[in-house]
Image (spheres, rainbow, N blue to C red):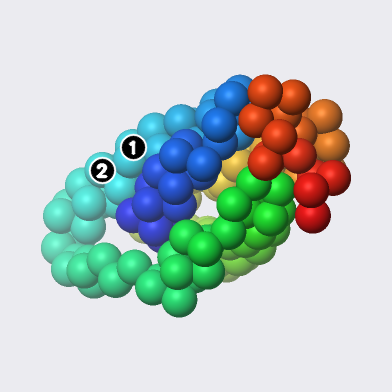
Amino acid sequence: MNNQEQDDAKELRNKAGDNQALVTMADTLTQDHKANQAAVEALAKQENVTLESYKPNKAEQDRLDNLKGAQFNDAFLNANVRDHKEALAIFRKAKTEMGGNPNVKVYIDQTIPVLESHLKMAENLRHDNKVMGSSENPENNKSNN
């Protein structure tokens, strides 16, 4: 999850143009998921668990690569909302099932608010036409759909 989010955030950063809200979102996602990846790796080492190696979602990456401007923004934000909702469901279930392990509980308790924050950011941007448009970079404007 963390590596995929960092890849997606890099693409968002590259395609954000002068849209500061999207640049900020990309930077936030990158920083938070990089920190979370370090935390999960430390937890895995502490718990003697081997993590699966990262396998990018090639189909999703190809789909986003081929989009520009508002089409990309909409697709990215919709996918980001979906992905963070799925992650929150997994983490909330894990909290119930694995909350007995104090190390795992701390990790989950620290991660859930960050995921909630990312979800709220994506939902807010997705519904804000002023944020989605750009006077200096018109290919980002929703009206070009």
Q: Residue at x 23, y 71 (%)?
A: 52
- Is 8 situated above or below 138? below
Examine the image and state in which quarter residue 124 appears: top right
Q: Between 138 and 124, which is closer to the camera in this rendering?
A: 138
Q: Is residue 55 left or right of residue 12?
A: left
For mark 2, what is the residue? Answer: 38
Quadrant of the frame with the C terminus: bottom right
Q: In the image, 42: left or right of 36?
A: left
Give the structural element (helix, strand or loop) at label 1: helix
Instruction: Say whether residue 108 is left or right of residue 7.
Output: right
Residue 68: image x %, image y %? 59, 52
Instruction: Calculate the distance from the C-alpha at mark 1 to the C-alpha at mark 2.
Output: 5 Å
Amino acid marked by disc 2: Ala
Q: Amino acid at mark 1?
A: Ala
Residue sitting nearer the eye, 8 or 136: 136
Q: Residue at x 59, y 25 (%)?
A: 18
In the displayed structure, would residue 89 be above or below residue 111?
Answer: below
Residue visible at 66% across and 59% down in the picture: 75
Total marks in image: 2
Indicate the position of residue 123 as horizontal and vertical percent values: 75, 45
What residue appears at the point 47 percent right and 60 percent down from the top-left corner? 65
Say few, some or many: other residues with alpha carbon within 10 Å of mark 2 (under 14 / 14 to 19 / 20 or more): few
Reading the image, the residue beneath label 1 is: 35
* CB atoms of marks 1 and 2 within 8 Å: yes
Residue 96: in sight, yes or no?
no
106 w.r.t. 4: above or below: above
| Element on which disc 2 rests | helix
User: Residue most toward the bottom?
Assistant: 59
Query: In the picture, which quadrant includes the N terminus?
Result: bottom left
* Coordinates of residue 55 in the picture (x, y in percent): 29, 71
Mark 1 neighbour class, 10 Å CA radius: few under 14, some 14 to 19, many 20 or more: few
